[in-house]
Image: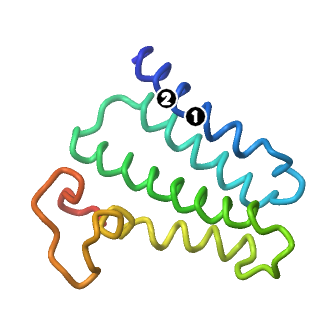
Amino acid sequence: MSSDYNYLTRYFVYFDSLYSVAIEEKYSKIYTEYLLIREEYYQLVTKPHLDWFVQMHQILQIDARLQILTDLLKIELKYPDCEDVFNESDIIEISRNDAKNYYKEVCGIRLNEPVPHSLLHFVPNGLK
């Protein structure tokens, strides 16, 4: 358990530095969402072990939210003078809604195509 926690802390070093770049003030909603995602990770890792497949699915879904949130934030930071295409609430909503298809899209699979039978795309019964 302790080593899992240490690995997770190391995993978040990058994100902590990215999200600390004056985001607390300019992007307070996104920063708050990041803190919630981070806490969900820690809660999941420190919980008594769930079924491994359920836990893996939940970790991947949380990670997908984080990846989408981060990608959209990077666009905002790169083009600060552009008129906002999305507001903070839109970015958060997109990260929550699109997480279920994130890895499918990253793997180049169209949303209407079947996914290969792999751990990356496996959804335990009762979870979506």
Q: Position of residue 111 (x, y in %)?
A: 29, 80
78 displayed left or right of 80: left
68 displayed left or right of 81: left
Instruction: Tell me, for residue 12, which label it has, or none.
Output: 1
The way the protein has been coloured in the rendering is: rainbow
Looking at the image, do the residues carrying marks 2 and 1 touch, with CB atoms under 8 Å apart? yes
- Under mark 2, the amino acid is Leu
39 relative to 100, above or below: above
Q: How many marks?
A: 2
89 vs 110, nearest the viewer: 110
Q: Residue at x 67, y 45 (%)?
A: 35
Q: Position of residue 49 (x, y in %)?
A: 30, 31
Q: Position of residue 72 (x, y in %)?
A: 62, 65
Q: Quadrant of the N terminus?
A: top left
Spatial separation of the CA atoms under disc 2 and disc 1: 6 Å
Q: Residue at x 74, y 52 (%)?
A: 31
86 displayed left or right of 6: right
| Mark 2 residue crowding within 10 angstroms, few (<14) / some (14–19) / many (20+) | some
Q: Quadrant of the C terminus?
A: bottom left
Q: Residue at x 87, y 59 (%)?
A: 26
4 relative to 126, above or below: above
Q: Which residue is mark 2?
A: 8
Give the farthest residue toward the left. Answer: 117
Q: Secondary structure at mark 2?
A: helix
Give the farthest residue toward the top. Answer: 2
Residue 69 quadrant:
bottom right
Q: Residue at x 33, y 61 (%)?
A: 103
25 relative to 80, above or below: above
128 vs 65, nearest the viewer: 65
- Under mark 1, the amino acid is Phe
